[in-house]
Amino acid sequence: MKNYTITKNNKILSFGLIAFGVVGIAYGFATDPTRTWASLLQSNFFLLAIALCGLFFYTFQFAAEAGWAAGILRVPLAMAQFLPHACVALLLIFIFGHHDLYHWTHAELYDKNSPHFDEILYGKKAFLNIPFFVIRLILYGIIWAGSAVLLRKYALEEDRVGGTENYWKTSKLSHVFLVLFAITSSTGAWDILMSVDAHWFSTLFGWYIFSGLFVTGLTVMGILTIYLKRNGYFPKVNENHIHDIGKYMFAFSIFWTYLWFSQFMLIWYANLPEEVAYYALRQEPELRPIFILNFVINFTIPFLVLMSRDSKRKENTVLVAGALMIIGHWLDVWLIVMPGIMGTHAHIGIIEIGATCFFAGLFLYVFFNSMSKTAVVPENHPMIEESYHFYL
């Protein structure tokens, strides 16, 4: 199968988003550096999570020896190639913006003679300290980005030589990655997002972030698959494949809703001061409309639109529902990050949109560039014929 040809429209879209993002970020640093760092953290994590979902989806297909998705596996693999860029950006954001982003990085909080001494953070200093935090970020980058690069190497080698040797190499690495992912997806969520509100904790948080990460990544994967199909690159991808992607989108939207409600209901009902403060802030009048909108979009859109079998088999329905779901989960990450840093002054404007456009443009450029350097369909995959004849 031929490689993807990067079109002029792809380049215009990618570079246009990056250029708009640079303008928004520059404006942000000139007017409100703290808000800009917060927007960069939120936007970078949002796109990093989408890329990480691509890697997760790719690896569990090999671990499960699933054949239905063999024909579209280059889409999540290309999504995962954004991970090296996202992990480097995340490290740089922390190094240069940690005092604006993470309250626990201020040294006076750990000085018992300081009026700013914080007993709660003092008890967490063995885990929440800058050197150990940087080490963890580097480890995440090595595991996530390293796996993405190595798996792509195996895919290219499979295209070149055929056989099953690289398939089984990929399968073995996929099993190892999934174990590491089970650990790092939760610890990464604690580090990158939950420590923004360092006094607060939730035992459901790792699962909650995973559910949002996975449904957003699946949605992006579905949209990109349909885009490539409509441009003639997936002639054997049919409504059955789209149906399966739609089922994943629907199922994990309901899973996200279950975790959202479980976390909110238990904390709000118990009304413990050290736990309820997180939601009390996000229930302030300035933030409550977005809090409610987040739930409405991320639950009602997939529930009402994607519930039926027919809707999940229609490309236009999946595209429209998917676009709204991406916006909804962007709001979800925004609600986690921005109020924790900006309080009730958090709002959405050119800085937040610009930061997201910058990373989205970079993501799309990396995706299309990766697709252009590998066969769109891995014809030497041992289960490719099963994928061609997949039927639901």
Image (cartoon, helix red, strand yellow):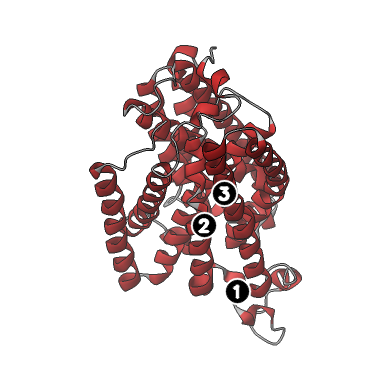
Q: Label 1, secondary structure: give it.
A: helix
The amino acid sitting under disc 1 is Thr
Is label 3 in contact with label 1 (beta carbons under 8 Å)? no
Please report the residue visible at 44 percent of the width from the left and 36 percent of the height from the top: 375
Q: Which mark is residue 148?
A: 3
Q: Is residue 203 visible?
A: no
Q: Reading the chain from its start, which is encountered first: label 3 or label 1? A: 1
Q: Position of residue 151 (x, y in %)?
A: 59, 45
Task: Report the number of discs.
Answer: 3
The amino acid sitting under disc 3 is Ala
Question: Dot 3: within a 10 Å radius of its alpha carbon, few (fewer than 14), some, or many (20 or more) residues?
Answer: many
Closer mark to the observer between disc 1 and disc 2: 2
Q: Which residue is mark 2?
A: 84
Q: Reading the chain from its start, which is encountered first: label 1 or label 2? A: 2
Query: Label 2, label 3: how many angstroms apart (C-alpha)?
Result: 8 Å
Closer mark to the observer between disc 3 and disc 1: 3
Q: Reading the chain from its start, which is encountered first: label 2 or label 3? A: 2
Question: Dot 1: within a 10 Å radius of its alpha carbon, few (fewer than 14), some, or many (20 or more) residues?
Answer: some
Please report the residue visible at 52 percent of the width from the left and 57 percent of the height from the top: 84
Q: Is residue 58 visible?
A: yes
Q: Position of residue 212 (x, y in %)?
A: 55, 40
Q: Which residue is mark 1?
A: 105
Q: Label 3, secondary structure: give it.
A: helix
The amino acid sitting under disc 2 is Pro
Measured along the vertical axis of the image, is residue 362 above or below residue 289?
below
Q: Position of residue 62 (x, y in %)?
A: 65, 33
Please report the residue visible at 43 percent of the width from the left and 39 percent of the height from the top: 326
Is label 2 in contact with label 3 (beta carbons under 8 Å)? yes
Q: Is residue 126 left or right of residue 71?
A: right
